[in-house]
Image (spheres, rainbow, N blue to C red):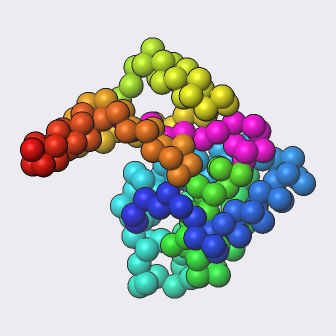
Amino acid sequence: MAEETKATDAGQRYAQSLFELTIEGGNLAKVESDLKALKGLIADSADLRRLLDSPAFSAEDKAKGLTAVAVKAGFDILTAKFLGLIATNGRAAELIGAINAFVALSAKHRGVVAAEVTSAAPLSAAQLKAVTAAVSSALGQTPEISTRVDPSILGGVKVRVGSRLFDASVRSKLDSLKFALKRA
C-alpha cells in the first residue's frame, strides 16, 4: 500500500465521523493511539497491506481480518467497529488516508501541529529535541513529531507540516547544485 499523506474525500468523512464519536465518548486519546499503532502494523506487515489492497479478498474478509487485528492488539471497541465498518463498506484502501485525517483532526483539537520528520538515519533524543524546538519556533505552535527514516536523502532532514515541506536534505542540495551546474 502506498503511503497516502492526503486523505480522500471518503477517508476524510470516515475520519470526521470517528473523531466526532470519540469526542462524544471521551476516548479520543485511546482511539488515536490505536490508529497510530495500526498504521505502524500496516507499514510493517506485507500480509496486512496485501489484505487491504488486494481485490482478491472480499469486503467481509477484510472486515474480519481487521477486526481480528483489532481484538488481538487490544484496541478500543470503537476502533474495532470503525475498522469493521470501513472494510465492510469497501473502503479498506482508504484506511491510511482516514488514519492520517483523524490524527490531523485530533492534533488540531489539542492545539498542536503534526509534523513528520524524515532523516537518513534514526535521530538521537538530542537531535529530535533540537528539531522539535526549531519547528516550534518556526511555526509558533507545539509540534507533535513523527519520525521516518529514508536513507535516500543521504543526510539532513525533511520536515512536512501539513502541505508544507521544509527540505534541508543533502539529496535536495545536491540536486540543486546539479541543476545550477547544468544551467551554467
Left or right of 94? Residue 151 is: left
Residue 105: image location, x then y, percent: 71, 51
Where does the image place residue 42, in percent across and percent down from the top left?
46, 57
Which residue is drawn at the image coordinates 85% and 51% (left, top)?
A: 23
Q: Is residue 167 above or below residue 21?
A: above
Q: Is 121 part of what is drawn in magenta? A: no
Residue at position x 50%, y 47% from top? 164
x%, y% of residue 40? 49, 48
Res 123 → quadrant: top left
Q: Residue at x 34, y 33 (%)?
A: 168
Which of 33 and 69 lies nearest the eye of the viewer? Answer: 33
Whether residue 173 can be seen here:
yes
Q: Viewed as shown, does residue 137 lie left or right of 51?
A: right
The residue sitting at the right extreme is 24
Highlighted range, magenta: 106-120
In the displayed structure, 55 sits above or below 123; it is: below
Instruction: Find the residue positioned furthest to the top.
Output: 126
Q: Tell me if I can see residue 71 in this picture.
A: no
The answer to which of 102 and 134 lies nearer the viewer is 134
Count of all numbered marks drawn on residues in the image: 0
Residue found at the very far front of the displayed protein: 184
| Residue 109 lies within the magenta run | yes
Q: Is residue 144 left or right of residue 14?
A: left
Residue at 66%, 28% in the rendered image: 140
Image quadrant in which the N terminus is located = bottom left
> Residue 161, how many percent across, how many down?
54, 43
* Nearer to us in this view, 136 or 42: 136
Image quarter where the C terminus lies is top left
